[in-house]
Every structure is written in C-alpha cells, then in structure tokens.
Image: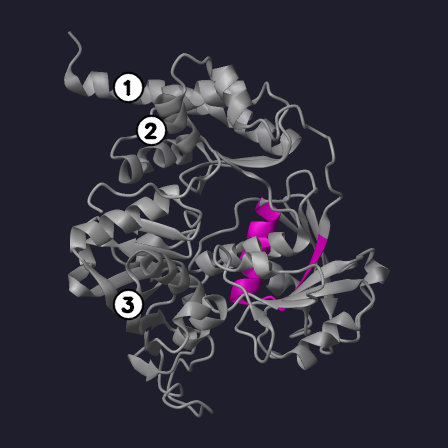
Amino acid sequence: MLQESDLARATWIDREALAEAMIPLIGRLYRENNVVTSVHGRGLVNQSVVGLLKAHRFARHIDDAELPLGETLPLLQALSTLRLGAASIDVARLAMAYKLEGAGQSLDGFLREQLADVVERQGIDEQTGTDVVLYGFGRIGRLLARILISHAGGGQGLRLRAVVVRRGSENDLIKRASLLRRDSVHGPFEGTITVDTVNNTILANGTLIQVIYSSDPASVDYTKFGIHDAIVVDNTGRWRDAEGLSQHLACPGVSRVLLTAPGKGALKNIVHGINHADIDLSDTIVTAASCTTNAITPVLKAVNDRFGIVDGHVETVHSFTNDQNLIDNFHSGDRRGRSAALNMVLTETGAAKAVAKALPELAGKLTGNAIRVPTPDVSMAILNLTLANGTTRDELNTYLRTMSLHSELHKQIDYIDSPEVVSSDFLGSRRAGIVDGLATICTDNKAVLYVWYDNEFGYSCQVIRVLEEMAGVHPPVFPKVRNAEPVAAF
C-alpha cells in the first residue's frame, strides 16, 4: 500500500502534468487570438507550472474550494479550437458557470453559446493598435511599462512606443533600463531587456521602446519616430490642469493625454468601473484620479447603492512616497519634510472630496485625512460611515463579497477574510481595493470598513483600464457579468 506521503507526492506530480499541458494552450490563445486568460482576475499568461497551481489554489478564497485543474484543462483545450477573437476570459468563472448552467450541454456547445460574440472571429476586424507614450518613468511609469509589455500580444491593443524623460547622467539609458529590470518592491522584470545606446532604445520582451530626452513637453516631434495618434500618459504630476497638459497636444503625433493624478478644473477624473463611460471621443485630456480615490470609490458606490451613505470619514494609512524626505529636511508641504522612514506623518488627502467627481451623489458627504507610514507600498483606507439603512456585519460582508464576484465592479473590488493577512500580502494586487472582511465593524447604521490597496500596482492596473477605454481596445470580458444577485439575508 502507498503511504499517505507517497499518495500526496503522486497527486502533486499529476497536477504538475496538468499544469504543464495548460502552458502551450494559454500561450497560443494569447499570441494567436489575443485572448487573455485568468483565474478570478489572476492572470495565467506567462505563468510557470507552480504559478498556475497557485492560481488554481487561490480560488478557494473565492469559491470555498480549490479550482480543479482537471476542469480547466478541458476548458482551455476547447477554447483553443473556437478560433476566438480578442477577449478576456476568466476560466474559473467560466468553469463555475458550466457547472451551474451547462446541464445537458457539451462543453463545446456551452462555450460557443457563452462566447458567441468572439467565436470564429480570429483575425476579423482586428485593430491596428494604439501608440502609447509614457511621459515620465518613475514608480507608476515603470509599472505601466511592465503591464503594457505583458499585454502586448500581437500588437492589436495598446502599443508602448516611447518613454520621455530628462537626461540625468551620461549613462542615463543604462540606469533607466536597470530600474525597469529590477524593482525593490515589485521584484525583477519577467523577461529579457536589451539596451541600444546608439539608437536610445530598450527592447523588452519584443517591445521596442524609444527613449526620448526632453524637458519641454511641447517640443517633441513623435512622428520622427514613427509614432502617430498617440496617447501620452503623463506620470510626472507636474501639470494637472488643461492648460499645462495641453502642451503635449502641441506635439506632432499626439492626439490625447491621460494624467496619472487627480486633475484640476473641469478635467474629467475617471475611476474605471465607476464613470469610465463618461469618456467621449472628444475628450483630449482625461485624468485617472488618485490611487486612494480609485481604491475607495468602488466600495463606496457598492455600499451607497444598497444601504445609502448619509456621511462618513475616510482615513488613509498610506505608504510613504518619493514626495517625502528620507531624513529631516526642508519641504514645502507641512510635516512632509520629516523623515518618511522614521515617522508616521499626518498629512492631508483630497481623495474623499475627489470621490464626488466620479460619484456625484456623495458630494459633500465625506471628509478625509491621511497618515503616511514607513512602508514602501500597499496602503489602507478606513471608511467610517453612517448608513441610511441599518444592517449587520455579516449582511454587509456578504454583500461586498458578492459584489466582488458577481457585479460589474468585480475588477475593482476584492474581498478577503483571512485572519493572518498583512499589507505585504497585497503586493501586486490588480484590484483597486480589497475589503478585509474580518476587520469590518457594523452596528445598525454605523459601519467601519477596512480596504487594502496596492497604491502602485493596483492603481496602475486602473490606469491601464482607463487607457484601454480611451483607445477603444478594451477586450470583451467573459463570462459576461450579471448584476449581483440579492443575498438571501436581504
């Protein structure tokens, strides 16, 4: 008889074999069909065997059971025969839908029905792609570059063409490439990077990035580099109004601008999932608001839609940023001159007021403040709310968990109820915010919610979603999202 340890080892080997069989299927769907596969939002493209196994195991946090590879492998095999057009497919949710709704149907028939909009659409009506220029190459700029490179596919979506920076040293290009290659917070770049100092280019996983040196946003002729109708993503935060950002539009080859910071004046502040439909073809300048606004607005909308929000206070416990000093030194802002590495620093945040730009029904109902703390990434927003309709902790948590799974906000809201998670566990989260269910406090119409967010990578994912909307290249998502079903407790 096999001992328990032998059985466990044999099971692991079998699961490894299934994961190995998935890798070429996932790769071909991505390269040939521009189909991006995921498990509850966790991307499968370019994952290792262990990465695929971890993604399947992660599903137990969502569906209370580990996702069997024996279910997803046949699904991927069937998808590979359908000649799909570009799409984003969550195989975990699709597998669950087949269990619940596919009685009496073959897997092929079910998939053809569910994915009817893209079946047999391979190579048909494919777009030529939209050129993207990153103006600035700091924390957010480099993360945007990583995401754009990983999403390059066959080039029919967003195409990273150039980065614009001010020259910092003689070996500036080498240093820029090194910062893209190595990151103390987010780890090494997944792939290969080659630097051409003669032509000032960086080749990253087949994406050729032209590095342009300029200190004047209105002085670059992008058409000289073969760039046309580009969207410039301004990561510098130096200009936040229409007048300043319009300097980019004066450049040949530029058609639109996206700011990765809250905008001033009448500029549209877009939080994807909330008001991205407000983007018009006539909008030449759009802003992606702040990381905190992106983290809290979806949760606030969900709560307001169901329970109503009378008023509330938002306190953000935020990782330090480059705007602060490592040690005490002069700073134009109050308190921010004190050492970020040694202190909790009380400061202001406009995130609470900014919510109203994306969600007007909350105008005047929220106040906010921020505490900068000595961690490099991942922050927390504490939402102290007065509700119009009283509820219980369990009812509120169940509702938010349901919204994270079965609503149009499932890409923005995540939910977790582990008693052991800490901030570093949310590094690399692609969601705008993650509700910590075990921390929820609720007594009738008084509720306190704790929302984690990766203020760098999670925010960058939101920026990419806005960028896709501006470019009109956001792929259709499957299975199609239905509005969250009412929870029995309601």
Q: Is 341 rendered above or below residue 75?
A: below
Residue at the spot 39% in from the left edge and 85% down from the top edge: 336
Residue bounds of the magenta highlight? 131-150
Residue at the spot 45% in from the left edge and 23% down from the top edge: 20
Find out whether the residues at labels 1 and 3 contact each other: C-beta distance under 8 Å: no
Q: Nearer the viewer, residue 4 or 34?
A: 34
Q: Residue 473 at what x, y percent from top left?
A: 65, 47
Q: Residue 323 at what x, y percent from top left?
A: 47, 79
Q: Residue 142 lies in magenta, yes or no?
A: yes
Q: Is 159 rendered above or below residue 387?
A: above
Q: Which residue is mark 3?
A: 383
Q: Which residue is mark 1?
A: 11
Label 3 CA crowd tier, 10 Å (few <14, some 14–19, many 20+) = many
| Secondary structure at numbered mark 1 | helix
Q: Quadrant of residue 476?
A: top right
Which of the marked residues, 1 or 3, is nearer the chain's N terminus? Answer: 1
Residue at the spot 73% in from the left edge and 70% down from the top edge: 213
Horizontal side of residue 100 vs 272, given as left or right: left
Amino acid, disc 1: Thr
Find out whether the residues at labels 1 and 2 contact each other: C-beta distance under 8 Å: no
Q: Is residue 462 visible?
A: yes
